[in-house]
Each structure stands twice: as structure tokens, then as C-alpha cells.
Amino acid sequence: MQFENDITYCLKVLQEGGLILYPTDTVWGIGCDATNDEAVAKIYALKKRQESKSMIVLVGEDQDISKYTQQPSIKVYDYIKGLHKPVTVIYQHAFNLSKNIINEDGSIGIRVVNEKFCKTLLQEFGKPIVATSANLSGFPTPLLFSDIDLLIKEGVDYIVQYRQEETAPAQPSAIIKINDDGSYTTIRT
């Protein structure tokens, strides 16, 4: 594997409650153990972001969603397959996650990843990982590793080496919200 060392270092940092800077299936993200309150608080502090503004979590498999929300909806998967890009789904009734990552209304954004580095990391870690864009609050989302602010790079415990040299700009995910009645609302395509 071309990212084996990155996985090893990321796992150590995540298990110790630290922060990683890593390539997701969309843009570069700042990540931590999504079940660790102190680690999540470090991300809010690093980004200078209000805790009332939400962040999303990544999971490795569809079935992982039921471990963190009581709102499974099979209908949404047909819609996701039609988009041909990563999709973050906002679910109601989140649980088993850090209290400071669950929105005030009880919702959480979750994305199931297919990108090989993230999927491997999630499978080996065995827990969801926060994925918030690697920018300071109020600044544009960096679409390339080279666009990431030095304050972010200096504020994490480990920077993944894999995919740093990519020159094609990344794109954020689509976002949809599942409503309590099972319908969904498109927030970003």
C-alpha cells in the first residue's frame, strides 16, 4: 500500500485524541475521533469556529450509519447512487458521537466514503472520523493541499503525505437532509 505509513501514524494520533490533516473523498479535511469530546473541541479551536456550526463525520460502510442515528432511510441510497459524487446525508436523532459534534437539533451529517485511503483508515480505526474542511472559519475551502493555510498545518498532530501532490482541484460533497417523514431535501448538489 502506498499509504501504509500514513495509516499507522493516523491511527496513533486518532487513538491519542489528536488531530490529522488528511485527504478525504472530497477536499482535504481536519479529522479526529468523532466520539471524543476533547478532540472535537480541538478542531473548533484550530478552525476558530463556533461550536454551534456543524461538522460532518465519515464512516466506512453503509451499515455503520445505524450505529450513530436512529433514522435509516433506504430511499435515500437510490438518490445517492444517481449523483455520481460523494454525498453527505444529514440524519436526525444522532447518538454515540461526541456531544459537541451533534447539532443543536439532534442531527448529524454523515458520509460513507469509497476513497481507498479514507476507507482503509476508517476500517482500521473502527470509529467515525470528523471531516471538516481544512480552512479557518470564514475563509474559502482549500481545493488543493497547497492551498491549506500554514496555521492549519501547524495546528494538527499529523499531516498525511498521500495525495499531497495532486493538482486537480477537489470538490465538496453534495448534501441532502432526510426529514422525519422519510422525504429528503437537497441542500447542495
Image: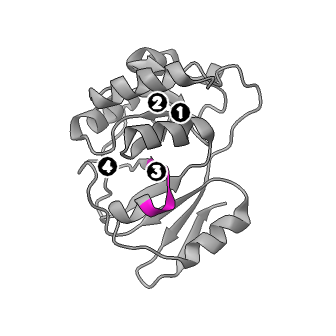
Give the CA distance from mark 3 to mark 1: 26 Å
User: Is any part of residue 26 visible from this angle?
Assistant: no
- Residue sitting at 31 percent across and 69 percent down? 93
Read off the residue under disc 4.
101
What residue sits right under mark 2 in the picture? 136
CB within 8 Å, label 3 to label 4: no
The mark closer to the camera, 2 or 3, is 3
Nearer the observer, 90 or 161: 161
Mark 4: few/some/many CA within 10 Å (<14, 14-19, 20+): many
Sequence order check, earlier mark of 3 and 1: 3
Give whichever of discs 1 and 4 has the lower sequence position.
Answer: 4
Seen in the image, is 45 located left or right of residue 177? left
Residue drawn at 64 percent across, 19 percent down: 146
Residue occupying the far front of the picture: 1
Quadrant of the snapshot with the C terminus: bottom right
Q: Separation of disc 3 and disc 4 at Cα?
A: 15 Å
Question: Which SS class for mark 3?
Answer: strand
Of badges 3 and 4, nearer the viewer stands: 3
Front disc: 1 or 4: 4
Q: Residue sitting at 66 percent across and 27 percent down?
A: 144
User: Residue drawn at (42%, 34%), measured in percent from left and top?
Assistant: 31
* Labels 3 and 4: the sequence-earlier one: 3
Is residue 125 depicted above or below 155 in this figure?
A: below
Depth check, mark 4 against mark 2: the one in front is 4
**Residue highlighted by disc 3:** 59
Tell whether label 2 touches label 1 (CB within 8 Å): yes
Magenta span of residues: 57-63
Q: Which residue is mark 1?
A: 139
